[in-house]
Structures are given as C-alpha cells and as structure tokens.
Amino acid sequence: MSSITPTQQVFQNFIGGQWRNSESSETFTSTNPARTSEIIGYFQKSTRADLNAAIEAARKAQPQWAAIPAPERGEILLRTALLLEQQKEELATLMTREMGKVLKETRGDVQIAIDVAKFIAGEGRRAEGETLPSAFADKFCMTVRHPLGIIGIITPWNFPIAIPAWKTFPALLAGNAVILKPASDTPLLALKMAELLHEAGLPAGVLNVITGPGGTLGDALASDKRINMISLTGSTEVGRHVAEICGRDLRRCSLELGGKNAVIVLEDADLDLAVAGISGAAFGTTGQRCTATSRVIVQKSVQQAFTERLVAAASTLRVGDGLDAATEMGPLVNKGRVKAVHEYTEVGKQEGAKLVLGGTPLTANEYSDGAFYTPTVFTDVTPTMRIAREEVFGPFVSIVPVDTYEDAIHVANGTEYGLSTGIFTESSRLTFRAIREIESGLVYINAATTGSEIHLPFGGMKASGNGHRELGAGAVEEFSEIKSVFVSYPTAKSKAGRL
Ligand code: UN1
C-alpha cells in the first residue's frame, strides 16, 4: 500500500485495504485557512458507487474481524497508539495547516486519539458482559456483547483526528466494520488515521474511509439500510435530519450536536481564575468547539470588573497562523465561517447588546489571504437575544448580567441546548446545588466549559444530542448489542422441585 504524505497532493479513498480513486474521477480541494491560496491536497469527490464499494468491503470483512478475540483487536489499537505517538508532531503540523488551530491544540487533538486508542485497547481485556444471579435454582444468567455490524461515522472539522478516533476505535473494538466520512474541510487526518491502523495490523475492509460532500455522500451513508448504526458529530440541524432518516428504519444513531455553553460567574468567584478559564474556553480553537464557552452569566455586582478583565485578556491574544509559535488564536476554518460569525456581530448590535471588543474580520497584511476574525465580546446581553440563544461557533462571547444564583441557573438552562456548563464560586453549598440543577451533560466547577477527559462519558442533554454518551466506560457498549443469556442446568430432581 502506498503511504500518504502531504507532498503527494492527491489523496485517495481507503476501501478494502486499498487506496482508490473515486468512480466520479472528480476531486475537491482542502486549503489552509491561514493562507487559503495554499492547497493542502486534492481529495476524492466520492459518490454512491464508492459508498457501495465501501459497504461491500465492510460486509466481507466484518464477520472475520468479529471472530478475532477482543484482546487481539485491542492489540491493534495499542500498536496504533504507539504509531500515533511516534508521528504526533508531524500529524499536529499537518492538522494546523489543514484546520488552522494552533500547534498546542493540534498536539492536544492527536493526544486525545492516542489516549483513546490506549484506553479502548485495554477495554478488549475487560469483561464482555455481566454475570448475574438467577431467581431460580440451577440457572445461570449473563449478558454478552454482540457487534452491530457496520457503523457509519460522520465527523466534523474541528477535531480532525480526535473525533474520528473516539468513534472509530470503540466501534472497531466491539467487532464492527466502519465506514468513516470525515468533514470536507479536514479529510487528511482521517485518512492518515486509517493508514496507521492498517500499518498496525487492521485487516483490509474493516475500516473504510471515503471523502466527499456532507450533503449527498453523508445522506447516502445515513440512508443505507446495510449500515446498522450512524454516529455523527455535527450541528443540531444535521443531527435532526440524520435522526429522521435512521428513525424511519429503526436504526441506531448516536448524535453529538450543538451547544450554547454557559459559564456562571458568581460574586464570590475568583475573578482571575474565571477570566483565565473563560478566555481559554471561549477563544481556544477560535471558539470552534461544541463545548466552547459562548455565554458568561455574571452576577451584576461583578459584571464590570469581570468584563474589564476579560476584555483586557482577550484583547492581547495574538491572532495569526497557527504554525507560528507566538500565535495564540488561529483562523476560522474557512472564509464562509468568517461571514457567518460576522453576521452574529451585526445581529448583536441590532439587538442592542454592547460590543466591548472586536467584532471585525481581520483582512490586512498577514491576514489578507486567511479566514481571521477578532476575539469578540458583547455585554449587556439579555437572555432572549439571538446571540444569547444561538450557537455562533466562533471567538464570540455574550455576557449576560443577572441578579442572583437562581437567575443564573434559570438563564443557563434556558436555551434549547445542554452540552457543557461551568460555574465559578467559592461556595460549597452553591457548588453542590449547581451540580444538581444544571441541565447539561458536562458540568465544570471553577473551570469553564472545555477540557473533558476521555475516560468519562461525553455528550449533552436536550438538543445537544439524542441521549447517547461517547467515550467513558460505556464507549464500547455504545457500538454493541447486548444479549441477555439464560442457561438452565436442571437435574431431574430440581426440575421436579419447581413444578
Ligand atoms: C467538540 O468540541 O466537538 O471537552 C469536542 C472538550 C474536548 C472535546 C470537544 N475534550 O472541549
């Protein structure tokens, strides 16, 4: 098999263990958002015919894969972890070029993939199910896991290897075959991941990667009844669409969707700690995380002090090419996103919120060819404004003043989303109330909304998902069927006794 390198420029699909061109003979480009004239590579514009080939390869490979003992399947993931470790720096650099976020963050992205590979590798040796007592004599009860078959995985561009890894590795460990469609803005790292899995010994056809447009190819993938489950991370709008498609056939789908994540800052909070945490979670990854902090709900008595400090911290952030070691915030993923974020600045102004920082695309000099936007902060935002309710997915913070703790919780829980919420307070009483009262899948005390760890469940409530959790102790179970097994071993006497 040929190795992929960024200088090769034309990247192929990975189907049945081979690098293959699309039947369409068409490609699309992926570009560097810091310098959009720099093409990272040409990728296959795949069609239904390519999907069909991938499904056929997966169908052929899956039964033999499932027959391999789970610890051995785990070994392949462990070898993949070691390969990822060896290539961490190269992969991080490629990712910064393709997606834009700074090297510190792309290293973190690769590290998530490494950690997940190690964690899931170990899961191969854990109990496959439970043993449970029977209510009857001479009977034994247990649960065993069974693979679902073929898993279709659709991933976003903001975590180009972490999210493909945290979905693919447990799906594989569970004995499934996978068809992965990475986001068109960042297809390179998913292909690289497939290459490493193959090098680590994954049999041909067990993982297939096809690139192409989310609309047509994603739809074809989600609608194909030969695919037993869809796992998607993306917008709530796309999630609803995929859920409808899967719902019609009663096929399982796991959705990790949008957020409008809030951090509550109470008057007893350590403001410096709050500012540092919020600045990182709001402007890190240029605000393009589903867990990014996009609302700060602050008690009025500290609104001014907090706002001044946040603006001071954010205004010194060095925006630029993520490859430059001095850069603290990279570009948005493409120029379309600059327009979308800027529209929210216009909305915020029209709604009467007070713009206290940024609110402009950066276009001069070093920024002229990139997708750059300033860190942006609005204050005096009210909970009903669109900028307090809708996901912006950019370096954009809405500060919402409130009077009391109760008001803060009410506002925090008042959007359609429920992914991640933080609270800064020194009060242990309010800490435990907040843990109980916050309606989101992730809760942070004295920290902002990002930085969850892979051995804990990840996912959201309400419109942030459909109730599934990824990662954590249930990671493999998510991609498995569970069978309850009842084994009877009655003797003539014990059977007679029960009658
Ligand atoms: C995402 O934004 O899609 O907790 C995932 C975090 C990261 C994952 C973010 N570990 O912010």
Image (tube, rainbow, N blue to C red):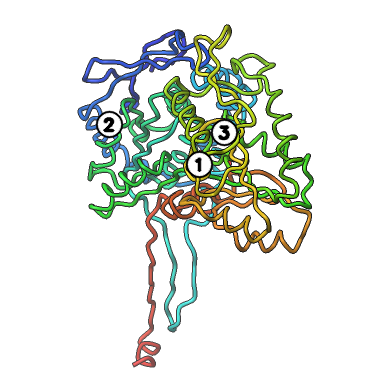
Real-space CA distance between mark 2 and mark 3, rounded to the nearest whole angstrom:
31 Å
Q: Kindly identify the residue that appears in the image at 71 percent across and 44 percent down.
A: 303
Is the residue marked 2 within 8 Å of ligand 1, measured from its CB? no
Mark 1 or mark 2, whichever is nearer to me? 2
Mark 1 or mark 3, whichever is nearer to me? 3
**Residue bearing mark 3:** 396
x%, y% of residue 237?
Answer: 36, 42
Image quadrant where one finds the N terminus: top left
Q: Residues within 10 Å of mark 2 (few under 14, many from 20)?
A: many
Task: Name which of mark 1 and mark 2 comes first in the sequence.
Answer: 1
Task: Name which of mark 1 and mark 3 comes first in the sequence.
Answer: 1
Q: Secondary structure at mark 1?
A: helix
Vertically, is 116 above or below 424? above
**Residue bearing mark 2:** 217
Q: Secondary structure at mark 3?
A: strand
Tell me, yes or no, whether the two marked residues, 1 and 3, touch with CB atoms within 8 Å.
no
Tell me, yes or no, whether the two marked residues, 1 and 2, touch with CB atoms within 8 Å.
no
Q: Amino acid at mark 1?
A: Gly
Vertically, is 39 above or below 48? above
